[in-house]
Each structure stands twice: as C-alpha cells, then as structure tokens.
Amino acid sequence: MCAECPSGRAAVLSARGRGEVKVFIASFHYLVVIYALTGVPGAGKSSVADELERRGHRVVRFESLIGDAVIGREDDSSVVDMDRIRKGSVLEDGTIIVGHLAHELDVDVAIVLRARPEIIEQRLRARGYSEGKAVENAEAEAIDVITIESVDSVSRVYEIDASELSVSEAADLVEEIIVGRGERFTAGRIDFSSYILGGY
C-alpha cells in the first residue's frame, strides 16, 4: 500500500529509460474518514445531528456505541471504558459520531459545536439540570474544554459558533467542513472567556 496514493484510486507511475517504459501500479488506497460532532451539553448537537441524518448523512450516537463499556457512575453520569468502545466500534467512511465524548474516539475530524455560555446555562436549566451542573457546563464552554481536548487527540479540529444559527444553518456549516471548505472554522477563533470574567 502506498501512503502517497490519492484517496480512492490507484496511482500509476511511469519512468522512461533505455528505450523502455516501466509502469508501476501502486496498491489501491482508500481513505476512510470518521467525523466527531462534539461539544458541551446544550450546544445543539442532537438537533443538528437529526438534521444531518434527515439529509442523508450516516449518523451514529455515541450512546449507541457504549454497550457493556459502562464501568461505574459519578455525579449521576455513567463512567465508560473508552478503550473498550474504541475496540468494539467498526464504522463506515463518512460516519458522523455525535456526543460530548465523540472526539475521544478514533476519529479523523472533530467538529465542535459551540454556543455562548449563557445560552448553554439557560438551555441546561430548562432541561432540569441543577444550577451547579448548568454553570459547570457553561464554564467549560467559556474555557474551551471540548476544543482543547479535541486538539489534543484529533488531527483536524473545527469550531462552529451556533449561538445565533438555526438548526438548518448549523447543519449547512457542518456540511461545508465535510466537503473540505472548513478553513474559516479552524479551531481557536472563538472566545467566550468574558463569561468567566463577568462580562456577559
């Protein structure tokens, strides 16, 4: 297999010498790309994932991959064995894994859905989260926790500020990234630190 081969097709190299034409055909190499749609709770992942699925994308919810990987509970949340999930997950090219831990799996591209921390806090309170949990997740958004974790483990990371976007508009931007037009969404351009500083 040739690491330099274009994705999805064989590479043919020819060389002329001493009146001969030598042709070398490299092995067929197909690059499988798996995406993570991640972000803190309340960022809008599920709604955007539903829209992407409606448009024909292959979407897998992180929860569906857990199986018997739950190894305990902490603060009313399940603690899972990520290595067990990784070993048990065989995904097709183009699959979008959705969940706030999706970026911790073996993915090639992480798309971090963002929203202003005050929006995260409001949404989580409306869902019945305790005040402490709502604020904790809002603060995690303010200090870029999911983006930092993604950059540490995924080679390509993008961020979408969906604070003022409809579900359809956010899905449009995810699709832009998937088709290779994500330069303007490169991680590191969103700053919600004013929430921590009391400026919201």
Image: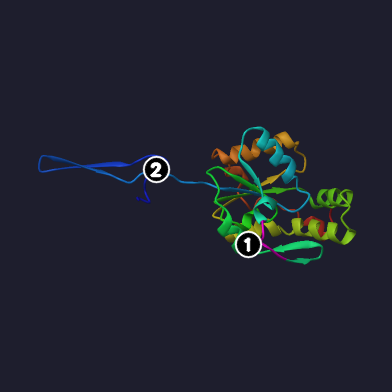
Foreground pick, 59 / 196: 59
Residue drawn where x is 42% and y is 40% of the image:
8
Relative horizontal placement of residue 52, taking residue 33 as reference (left or right): right
The residues colored magenta run 67-71
Amino acid residing under circle 2: Pro
- Front tag of 1 and 2: 1
Residue drawn where x is 65% and y is 38% of the image:
173
Nearer the N terminus, badge 1 or badge 2? 2
Amino acid residing under circle 1: Met
The answer to whether residue 38 is visible is no
Foreground pick, 28 / 148: 28
- Contact (Cβ within 8 Å) of mark 1 with mark 2: no
Q: Which disc, if any, is residue 115?
A: none
Residue drawn where x is 89% and y is 58% of the image:
130
Residue 69 position in % (x across, y down): 66, 61
Residue 199 position in % (x across, y down): 84, 55
Q: Which disc, if any, is residue 6?
A: 2
To which quarter of the image does residue 175 belong?
top right
To which quarter of the image does residue 176 belong?
top right
Residue 50 position in % (x across, y down): 71, 38
Q: Is residue 45 magenta?
A: no
For mark 1, does the 10 Å Cα neighbourhood hold few (<14), some (14 to 19), or many (20 or more) residues?
some
For mark 2, does the 10 Å Cα neighbourhood hold few (<14), some (14 to 19), or many (20 or more) residues?
few
Residue 30 position in % (x across, y down): 43, 44
Magenta span main SS: loop
Secondary structure, mark 1, is helix
The answer to whether residue 52 is visible is yes
Q: Is residue 69 magenta?
A: yes
| Residue, disc 1 | 82
Is 170 placed above or below 43 here? above
Foreground pick, 68 / 134: 68
